[in-house]
Image (cartoon, rainbow, N blue to C red):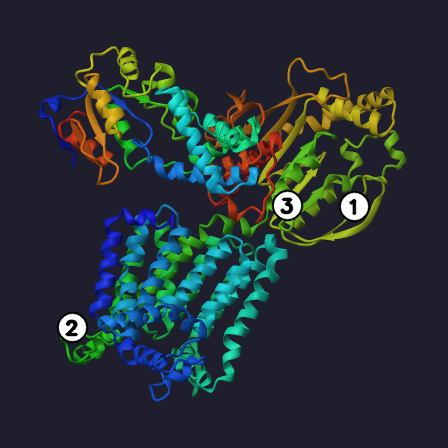
Amino acid sequence: MELIKPFFRLRLFWLGAAIRLAACLLLEPMAQKDWFGPFFDNWMANPSFIPWNAAAGLDDKVFPYGPVMFLSILPFCLPGYLLKAFGADAALTAVRGAIFSADLIILLLLAHLFPRQEKKLLAFYWFSPLVLLANYWAGQLDAIPTVWLVASCLALRNYRFRSAAVFLAAASAAKLSIAVVFPFFLLYLIRNRRFTGLRLDFVLPFLAVLVLGLGLPIFAESYRHLVMGTPEMFRLFDLHLKLGDIPLFLTPIIFGCTFYAVAQVSRLSFDLFFSLVGCALLSILLTTRTPPGWYIWFVPFLVAHLVRARRSQMLPAGLFILTASMCQYLFWPSPLWPGMDESFTPETWLKPQFISLSYTATLFAGIILLADTLRRDILNNNIYQIGKKPASIAIAGNSGAGKDRCARLVADLLGEDSVVQISGDDYHNWDRYGLMWQSLTHLSPQANQLGRFAADVLSILDRKRILCRVYDHQTGRFRQPASRRAGDFVLVSGLHALYQEKLNAKFDLKIFLDLDERLRVFFKCRRDVQERGHSLYDTLASIEKRRPDAAQYIAPQAQLADIVFRLEPLPNSDLNDFNVIPKFRLTVLLRRAMYTYSLVRQLVVMGHLNTQLSEGGEIFEQSILIEGFCLPGQAKIIASQLLPGLDDILAPKPQWRDGFDGIIQLITLCHLMQNCKERL
Amino acid sequence: MPHIYDQDRFQTEPSAVLLDLDNTLYPFEPAHSAAESEVLAMAAQQMGLAVKHVRAAFSQARQDVKKRLGPVASSHNRLLYFSRGIESLGRKAQPLLALTLEQTYWNVFFQNIRLFDDVILFLTALKGSGIPICLVTDLTAEVQYRKILFLELENYFDYIVTSEDSGRDKPDPASFRLALELLQIPPERVWMIGDNPQTDIDGGRASGLTTLLKKNGPFMSASQAHLDFDRFADLHKFMRDRKWVLY
C-alpha cells in the first residue's frame, strides 16, 4: 500500500489506468473472444475440479495453461458473475479483471525493485506499447505468470529463497514455458558462495510445488491433451539451418551459449542475475516467432535496463520497443472495435514483405539492445569485475595488535562461506618448542616462510586450492596440513602481511593495525599475568626482547598500508590497574581515500561521534580522530548511506558490530569498495 | 507557474530570502511515517504491547507535551513524547528505551529524506546571485543542524535561525525578527518561503515580509500568501525571467 501511494499523486498513472479501463470496456481481443471467453463460459456453466474439461467441444488453443493460471483467474469469476446482472459478460469480465490486476501488480512489484523511480516506471512500464499491446490489444494472459516471475525475483533479492522457489514454480505451473529461466535461478544460488547453506531452501520447495502443480493434473486426460499437447514449446525449434537434410535448431544453441556464458561468471550479484535473465529471455524472443504475450515476460527486465540506462542507451531500447510492437501489431489479429463486425488482420492488407521487414528490424534492434545490455549492464557491473578475481584484504600489525579480531570483523560482514583466510602464523618456521626461538623472534622475517606464504596467497588469488599447515594456538604445535579452496574474498593476516612489495601490489586493500604501545603492553600483561600466571617481570622482559624487531620489521609496514587503524587510550587513563579496561579513541589514517568527507559527515550526523578530520602530513593522506560510542546498528545505517549496492557483497545476514569495531568494519568496506571499483 | 496575488511586492528582486526547512525543502510525510512506524513497532515489541496502544499513548503524550510547553522548540522534541508515552503505559521512566526510540526515529527519518526536485539549483542560483539566505525553522537546533548536514545544504545558508534560538515557534515574530537582525536589513524586500499557511505565511506577513507559499499537492487551502508555487523550478524560472538571478 505504501508503494502505490506515490503513484496516486501522478496524473500519468491515472491516465494509464483510464486507457486500460477503456480498452477493457471497448476492445474485444480475438484470444479472449474465441478462446478464454468460451472456455470460462463453459466452466462457469459446468464447474469442475478439472478445469480443462471445460474445453470440450472447443478449439485446442482455448486454455493451454497450467492450474496456477486457472487459479489466478478464478477469484475474478465471482465479480464477473455478479456483474452479469448489469449486462456484462461474466467470463470476459473475469479474464480482463485478472489481466488488469496482474498488470497493476507488476507495476507495484517493479516499484519494490526500483524504489523512488515512479516516473520512470510509468514511462517504461505503464505506458510501454509492448505491455498495452499484449494485455489489451491481443488480450493475452501472460501478465499473470509474469507477476509470479517478478515476485520470485523480488523474493530472491530479499534472500527469501523459499518464497522465490514457490513463486517461480507457480509461474511455471501457470505457463510451462517460463520454466526456461529456472537454470539461471539455480546458477545465481550456485555462483554465490554466501548462499552455500541456503540452496536447498530454494530447490526443494521449487520441485515440490512444481510436481504438485504440473504433475498432479497429468492424471486428467483433458490436461494432457490441452496443456501438454500445446505447440507453444515447439516454437523453440522454429529457427533452424539445414545441415545437409538434417535441421539444426538455433534457438537451443543460442540459449545454451547464454547459459554457458553466465556460468562462467564466478560471482553473480542480483543486478547481474536480473540482467542476464533478461538477456536469455531476449535471445529466445529474437529467435522465435513468439506471440505478443511472450514479450510481457521480458518487459520487467527491459524496464530494469531502462531505469539504469543513460540517455544514449534509450535509443536501442526504444527502437526495439517500437519494432517489436510493430511486429506484434502485424502478427496478431486486431480486436473488435465497438460497432465493427469482423476482426480484420493487418496481414490481409499489408504485403508479406512488410511483415518480413518488420521482423528483420526487430531482430536488428534486439541484437543491438542485447549488445548494449551486455556491455553496459554486465561488463561494467562492479560485482562482475570483483568476481573476475577474488577481492583481497591484507592485515598487518604487531603481535597482539588485533589482526585476528580485525579479520573476524571483516569475515562477519562478508560471510564465512565467501571468505578464505590465510594467517601468517601458519607460516612460522618452527612451532612454539623450536629451539631457534632462543636466537630469533617471531617478528623476524627469517623465522617465517615468507616465500611460501607469498606463493600460497598468489595461488588463492588465482582461485586455486592450497594445502597449508595450521598453527594451533592452544598447543603451540602445527596441525596436519589442510586444503583450502578459493573464495570470493581473501583475508590475509600476519606479522609480515605487507612485508613483500610485489605481493602488496596484488592486494585490493592493505590495513595496518597500530595498537598504542601502552595499550598493547597493558593487554599483553593483563593476559599473561592474569590468565596464564606469568610474572609481570618475565612478561615485560619478553616484550622488551621483541621491541627492536618490531621497530625494524613490523612498524615500517604502516607506511605501505591504505588504512592504519590506531587505537589509543584516552588521555589521563590509568593503565596500571589490570582490572579496569581503559577507554580508547580511534585514529584512522587514510591514504588515497575518496570517501573521507562523506564518511566524516555521516559519522557526525548519523553516528553522533566526536570526529576530527585533519589532512595528513603526506599528500593523499588524511587522518580522522574518532571519540565516543557508536550505537549498535549505526555502522550499518551509515554503510547503507555511503555504499549503495552493498547488499550484493555482504553475507545474507551480515554481523555488524557496535563501538569502534563497527567503525573499523565500515571504513574497511568503504575502502574495499573504492579500490575494487578502480579495477574497472 | 507561480501565481502572484500581489504584484506590487514583486517589482524588484528580494534583498534576502528566509526559508522554512521541513516540508518546504523536502517532503516531511514519507520520512516521518517511515520513522514513526519503525519506532512504534520497536516500542511495541520492547514493551510487549500492541502497536495501536503504543500509538495512542505516544500521540496523547505528544498532545500533552505540546499543550504544556506551548509554541517553543522543545515542544517538538520527540524524546519527550516517547518518554511521557512510555510512562503513561505504566513502564515508569525508561531513559534508555526513550533515547533508543528517539535515535531510531531520526535514523529512519534521515534514511527516507529526499530534497524536493530542483531545490539545489534554486539555492545555487540565489547564492550565486548574491542574495543572502537564512533558514528560519521551528525545532531544536541539534536536529535541524543534523538534517542540514545530512542533506548537504550547509554551504547555502548565511544564517540559521531555529526556534530554540529565538525562543518562540513561528508564527511568533521572534524568529523572523532574529533573522532580520542577523541579516541587518529591513523586512520590506525580504521573502519568506514556506509551506505552512499559518506559521510561515501569516506569521511572515505579520512581520512585514513578502510571503511565498510552497504548495504541496493540488488541494492546499487558500492562504494569505503574496505568491504561491508548486515546484522550485517554477519559482526559479520566475526569477530568471525577471533577471533577478544570474542563472
> Measured from the top left, where is residue A660 in percent x and y?
61, 29
Question: Circle 3 marks a residue in which chain?
Answer: A
Question: Circle 1 marks a residue in which chain?
Answer: A
Position of the C terminus of chain B by quadrant? top left
Sort mark 2 into few (<14), some (14-19) or many (20+) by Cα contacts within 10 Å: few
Side of B6 relative to B115 (left or right) = left
Residue B246 appears in view? no
Q: Disc 2 marks which residue?
A: A338
Disc 2 is placed on an element classified as: loop
Q: Amino acid at mark 1?
A: Val
> Measured from the top left, where is residue A36 in percent x and y?
32, 77
Disc 3 is placed on an element classified as: strand
Is residue A522 or residue A484 the one in the foreground? A522
Disc 1 is placed on an element classified as: strand
Side of A177 relative to B22 (left or right) = right
> Measured from the top left, where is residue A194 in percent x and y?
60, 52
> Measured from the top left, where is residue B51 in percent x and y?
48, 42
Residue A171 appears in view? yes
Is residue A388 or residue A180 the one in the foreground? A180
Q: What residue is drawn where x is 44% and y is 50%?
A: A380
Is residue A595 or residue B102 the one in the foreground? B102
Q: Disc 1 marks which residue?
A: A470
Question: Circle 2 marks a residue in which chain?
Answer: A
Q: Amino acid at mark 2?
A: Pro
